[in-house]
Amino acid sequence: MSDATRTRIGALDIVATVSVVFALVFAIASPRIESQGEAARLLFVHVPTIWLAYLAFAVTFVASILYLATRRLRWDHVAGASAEIGVVFTTVAIIGGMVWGKATWNVYWTWDARLTLTAIMLFVYIGYLALRRVIAEPEARARRSAVLGIVGLVQLIPVHFSVTWWRTLHQTNTFRPRDIQMDGPILAALLVSVAAFTVVYAALLRHRVRLEGLELAAYAAAAAPVGPVAGDAVSAPNIGNSGAQP
C-alpha cells in the first residue's frame, strides 16, 4: 500500500474518531426527554445504527450488481465488506432497541413487526457471510454471493415500512419530515450522530476492503504452482554403478 493511501486512511480514521467524540458531546448535552427518561439517549445510537445498516446493505446491493456487470473482484470485496459492517450495525441496533424497550415497554423483546423483520434481515445477511466463507474459489464465491446480495435488499422495504403498514408498538419512522416532533437541540444531536456513524462506516469499509484484497492475494499465492526448490538440481548417487571399472 502506498504512502499516500496510508495518509488518506489515517486521516479518515482521525475524522471518524473526532466525529464520534462530537456526537457523544451532543448526545450528553441534549435536553432530557421527560416521558422516556435517560433511556431516550439511546436514540442517538439506535437510529444511526439502523440507518447505517440500511446504507451498508444498499452498498452491498450496488456492489453486487457492479461485480456481475464488470466481473471485477474489487466490487465483490466492497459488497462483502459492507455486508459485514451492516451485520455489526444491525446487531447494535437490535441490542440498543432491546435496552430501550425494557425501559419503555418493560420487555426486552416483543414480536413487533419492525423488530421481527429486522431480526430476519440480520439472519439473512449472516447467511450471506456464511456463504462467502464456505466457497474458497474467489470467482465462484463472488458470483453466488452477488445473487444473494441483490435479492437480500428486498427485505429493506418491509423492514422500513412495517411501522406504516401494520399497527405496532414501534414508533413511526423518525426522519419523515411531517412526523418529526423533536426539539431543535435533540434533532441536532441526532443528525450529528448519524453523520458520525456514517464516517465510521466509511473508515471501516476502507479497512475491510483492504483486508479482502490481502485475503485474495494470500489465496492466489497458496494456489500458485510451486517453483523449483533448492537442491532440485542435485541428483542422488547411483549406488549400483559406483564400483570400480574393470
Image (cartoon, helix red, strand yellow):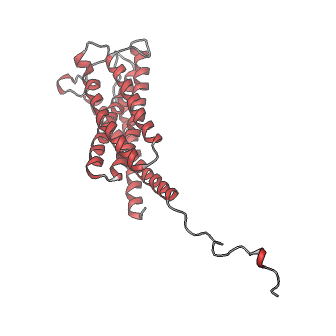
Quarter-wise, where is residue 116 in the image? Answer: top left
Quarter-wise, where is residue 160 in the image? Answer: top left
Front-most of residues 150 and 29: 150
Q: Position of residue 14 (x, y in %)?
A: 41, 50
Name the quarter where the C terminus is drawn: bottom right
Residue under the image location 42 percent in, 64 percent down: 3
Position above or below: 96 against 201: above
Residue furthest to the bottom in view is: 246
Residue under the image location 63 percent in, 75 percent down: 233
Residue 127 seen anywhere in this rendered image of the structure: yes
Residue under the image location 29 percent in, 28 percent down: 155
Q: Position of residue 162 (x, y in %)?
A: 27, 20
Front-most of residues 185 and 73: 73
Front-most of residues 112 and 212: 212
Front-most of residues 196 and 84: 84
Q: Position of residue 62 (x, y in %)?
A: 27, 43
Left or right: where does residue 218 sit relative to residue 57?
A: right
Quarter-wise, where is residue 113 in the image? Answer: top left
Residue furthest to the front in view is: 246
Label tally: 0
Q: Position of residue 244 (x, y in %)?
A: 82, 84
Residue 182 seen anywhere in this rendered image of the structure: no
Name the quarter where the N terminus is drawn: bottom left
Position above or below: 14 against 2: above
Residue under the image location 36 percent in, 17 percent down: 36
Position above or below: 198 against 101: below
